[in-house]
Amino acid sequence: MSPPGSSEHHPGAGHALWVRLTHWVGAASVLTLAFTGYVILMAHPRLYWGETGNDLTPTLIELPVSRNYKHGGWEVRTSAFPTGGAAVSAVRTYDILNWNGWARSLHFLAAWCFVLSGLAYLVAALWGGHLRRDLLPQARELRARSLWADVRAHLRRVSPAHGGPPYNLLQKVSYSFVVLIALPLMIITGMAMSPAINAAYPFLAAMFGGTQSARTVHFLLFALLVLFVVVHVVMVVLSGFRRQMRAMTVGRSA
Amino acid sequence: MSERSIIVSRRRIVGGLAAAGGLLLSGCSRTDPPTYGNLLRMGDQFTYRAQRLLLPQRALAREYSRADITSVPAIGNTDPGDANVPGFDEHNGPRYAQLRAGAFADWRLQVEGSVTRPGGYSLADLRRFPARTQITKHTCEEGWSAISEWTGVPLRSVLEHAGMKPSARFVNFFTFDQGADSIDMLDALHPQTLLAYGMNGRELPIAHGAPLRLRVEKQLGYKSQKFLHRIVVTDSFYDPGKLGPIGAGWAWYVGI
């Protein structure tokens, strides 16, 4: 294994070993996180804005997701205060509780794998110059006209790729967004939902306007990342599946 | 040559992992929750150790003002005296119904185990301790949250009154609805960990755990057990089997 960035990339060289390793550990973690996250969401597919939210408060978005528990309905609402007032309490009659404990534990196990491989990736990408050289779009590239031209070119026909860097403009923009913005925000919004981390670092949730806002952002980013994965896989297939897979596994595309 | 280098590097990796694991688990094998070789429980254990290591343990959960109090659902078991509810305990259920009929005048919280003065505390006894009132957020594992005001006695005061021994490591809670769970000493002695008998300015309602419930503010809601009747202080981890979270497939530590 050569140290990151020691060899100049040339078309056909494929991906460096550390890129391939962190790519697949990251991919497995993200797929596990997406699946278990969805199972966790099934218990309460309502999203809110602000610090709190529950079945007795207004929702921002109610997702068309079936719930993975069964209850016998809600019993009479009573005022939450002895003196009356707007806040109420109601009893959700017990039937079958959700049994998603395994999903939450697996979500966090995958999150540890993801965070550790993600940190290794970022350190290597910064140190070896992969980030600056291959991923970050140059300022002069970032013109609306060139972006639009690249989108149109992709819609017409996806040209065969050599596998690995150098990347075209759309690749640079989407990879940079996922690696530097979406995935780190996913971790931060995840931590902003934790009671223990919230107690220690309240600014994490405050940045998003509250814990439930962070949960909503966590979900929206999940939706965005699922979209990314779908488009990513479609592009891999259209640009030469065998060559692309060789580049990301054995490291040689030619 | 290449085979040898692979073996050496694999040894290094395994050795490194073992060292990292040792760092996380050192000296606490006997006083940690068991994993039973279950990969998910090992992940829970890793999170527990990492949070205990990395987070400032004296941090207080955020407290809110009365204006922030929200509506609050009552879920799970909302009446242990009701024989039609799943989790009805043949022994404790009728006992609960009887105690409730007498406005919990005969109810006692048994405190035993690693304490020098085991005994029972009535509600009146608990109210004689200096009370603490806190307005905090309940975070349910399902995903919802609610802010309520809780009044009660810090668990620490009761443990000190009962003469908790220095060897104590865990505090176990037993409930009228067939529940049993435990917390470690860091959570047990935390100033916001309450034995709550009041909610939003009145007595704790039945659905929210009357006559007494636990409040553990730095973990998910299910650690704040309702309908308490017994506390047992132990020197090592006690697994209550199917009655506890591990037996039911849930994580024991959920600071999350």
Image (spheres, coloured by chain):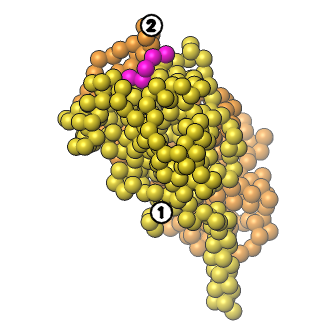
- In the image, is residue B101 above or below residue A218? above
Residue type (three-letter) at the residue carrying disc 2: Thr
- In the image, is residue B11 above or below residue B210? below
In percent of width and height, residue B222 lies at 44, 40
In percent of width and height, residue A40 lies at 42, 43
Quarter of the image for the N terminus of chain B: give it: bottom right
Q: Foreground mark, 2 or 1?
A: 2
Q: Is residue B110 magenta?
A: no
Q: What residue is drawn where x is 28% and y is 21%?
A: A75
Q: What residue is drawn where x is 53% and y is 53%?
A: B114
Residue corresponding to mark 2: A83
B107 lies left or right of B118: left
Helix, strand or loop for disc 1: loop
Distance from disc 2 to disc 1, alpha carbons, whole Å, reads 48 Å
Please tell me how crowded label 1 is: few (under 14), some (14-19), or many (20+) other residues with Cα within 10 Å: some
In percent of width and height, residue B217 lies at 56, 35
In percent of width and height, residue B104 lies at 35, 27
Quarter of the image for the C terminus of chain B: give it: top right
Residue corresponding to mark 1: B35
Please tell me how crowded label 2 is: few (under 14), some (14-19), or many (20+) other residues with Cα within 10 Å: few
A200 lies left or right of B69: right
Helix, strand or loop for disc 2: loop
Residue found farthest to the left: B84
A83 lies left or right of B162: left
The hue in which chain B appears in the rendered picture of the protein: yellow
- In the image, is residue B243 above or below residue A199? below
Residue type (three-letter) at the residue carrying disc 1: Thr
Which residues fall within the magenta stretch?
B201-207
The hue in which chain A appears in the rendered picture of the protein: orange
Q: Quadrant of residue A79?
A: top left
